[in-house]
Amino acid sequence: MKVGILTFHSAANYGAVLQAYATQEALLELGVDAEIIDYANSKRREMYDIRYLVRRTRKNGLFAVLKVLAGTSLIVLRKKKFRKFCHKNYHLTDRKFHTPEQLKTELPKYDYYMVGSDQVWNYENNGKDMSYLLDFVSEKDKTISYASSFGLASIPEELMTDYTRCLNGIKWLSVREKAGADIVESLIDKKKPVVLDPVFLLTKKRWGNVAKFTNQVREPYILLYTTKATYHDDFLRATGYDVKRYHIAHLTTSPRLKDMLDSKTKLVFTASPEEFLGLVENARLVLTSSFHGTAMSIIFQKQFITFLSNNKGKDARITDLLNRLGLTNRIFHDDITQEQVDKQICYEIVQNKLEDLREKSFSFLQQAMNLSVKDKQCD
């Protein structure tokens, strides 16, 4: 059996490449010949292009543009590391595809076509390309959505017809968050299962084998991986956290002057996906606003605090996960204390909940592809 996977696999983004890798590996463990379709439309290709980054930062002023230009060499190096990871770990189609028409007429035949995870159904990220809802597949009985995410609170009215048509055409449909399930139900009046993000289908041991720690950060350290550096300031202001005992590993592409001048802060610009995993695995505490930063902290059983963006659609990805695992107390709020941050997470309870969710997630995949029951997780 051969399955073609369509996802955001080529982004210079840790979550994107790790979930794509995990999807592939989970299917391989189930005895399926999994292959990632090397597809990126014009929107996806430009999102990590330096020219696009410059255009996007113009609204923030000349200084923001100059910061991007100054970091060009670091951006190039970071992208090179991502390409190396993909080349080493992905099973890709022999050729690249750039347009929906190419997918319809030139893509190899598969037993099943799977789209999934990440924000593949976010029209702002996929360029309003219905290929990411498997529109190009004529044999609808062969279509599967695994853990697809919208990252949106709702679908705009002008796109509802297209989304409804495509969602109705997917034979086996699952989503990653309850908010996504609610959107699906509002469009096609059908309840669909909520399954785990693919990264949870691989075990802590498996991810540990991928992780690489380069000792570029002095231990013990706190890992800071957020969209806004000011989240760290908010954290210190609220908790009065004693950071003197720790160094700070700040994984960022946009450092502040104060971070550059802080002798205890190590700025990490170009970590590979393997190095990102190593940074999470070896941290004493992870401060993150990232869904996959949160997910990998849970997998590696780390102490963590997650920051929300106040964007209902995007935050739903994190709040739904933490709610299902009983970890909503790890969400940052203005009254959080150092004692609450330091309180040890009972990962035995979390692990039991994860095992149940893994079993249901694997069961969905097995039913969709008519597979016999195998192990519930990938070691």
Image (tube, grey):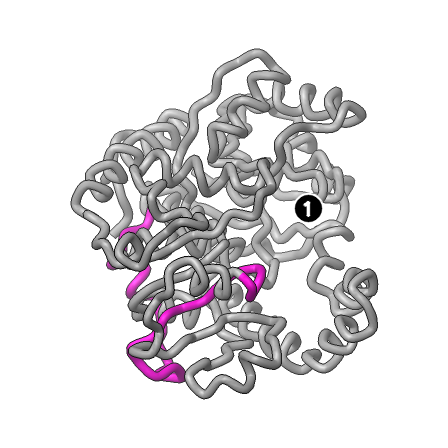
Q: Residue at x 47, y 28 (%)?
A: 178
| 18 over 316 or under it: above or below | below
- Amino acid at circle 1: Asn
Residue 19 appears in the rendering: no
| 369 over 223 or under it: above or below | above
| 355 over 256 or under it: above or below | above
Q: Which residue is mark 1?
A: 125
Foreground of the two, 289 or 195: 289
Please indicate whether residue 199 sits to the left or right of residue 256 in the image: left
Image quarter of residue 304 = bottom left
Foreground of the two, 226 or 342: 342
Please indicate whether residue 30 sits to the left or right of residue 124 in the image: left
Query: Magenta segment, which residues?
Result: 201-230
x, y (%) of residue 165? 69, 20
Foreground of the two, 71 or 132: 71
- Magenta span has 58? no
